[in-house]
Amino acid sequence: MKFKLLTALVPIWLLFSCDCVYQSEGILVDKESGVSLSDIQIMVGEGQMMDTLSSDSEGHFKYEVISGFCEFKEFAFSGDHIKAKKLQIYNGHSDTLYLELLPEPILQEIISSI
């Protein structure tokens, strides 16, 4: 009887024991000037499993989720004035991330005419 109960409970326990808490945070800054970048759109994951967030007024972001896969997550950063960037960020990562700004439209016209 105990063996049957144990046999029935082990698969259920394994199903729930695979989940863990994934956490990462950082500050987004301009690669050239070091100025923090606010309101940068951040997409984590893909398809139906995608979450969205944005950096705050000081460029800070924090992402926490209970997940079955906790080694790393795919992050995509985008905004009106930055070059889009994708990164794999490992669980527990906390760091400054450097993003490139796009050239201002006037400078872009001058550069393309040269």
Image (tube, helix red, strand yellow):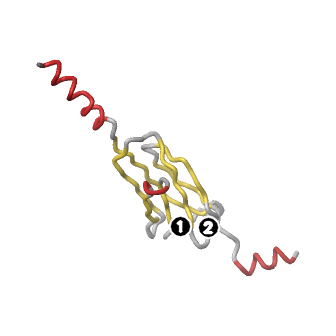
State how far apart marks 1 and 2 are (Cα): 9 Å
Measuring from the top left, give residue 85's x and y in whole percent: 60, 58
Outermost residue, right direction? 114
Q: Residues within 10 Å of mark 2 (few under 14, many from 20)?
A: some
Residue occupied by mark 2: 82
Q: In this view, does 48 lie above or below 56?
A: above
Please give left or right for residue 83 compared with residue 92 in the image.
Answer: right
Residue 18, quarter of picture: top left
Please give left or right for residue 77 compared with residue 60 in the image.
Answer: right
Q: Is residue 9 above or below residue 79?
A: above
Please give left or right for residue 57 compared with residue 65 in the image.
Answer: right
What amino acid is found at the position of numbered circle 2 in the picture? Ile
Q: Quadrant of the C terminus?
A: bottom right
What amino acid is found at the position of numbered circle 1 in the picture? Leu
Q: Which residue is pictured at 24% across the width and 27% down the height? A: 10
Outermost residue, left direction? 1
Judged from the image, the secondary structure of the residue bearing numbered disc 2 is loop
Residue occupied by mark 1: 37
Please give left or right for residue 89 compared with residue 18 in the image.
Answer: right
Residue 108, quarter of picture: bottom right
Q: Is residue 114 above or below residue 2?
A: below
Q: Which residue is pictured at 70% across the width and 72% down the height? A: 103
- Closer to the chain start, of discs 1 and 2, is 1
Q: Which residue is pictured at 43% across the width and 54% down the height? A: 49
Judged from the image, the secondary structure of the residue bearing numbered disc 1 is loop
Residue 77, quarter of picture: bottom right
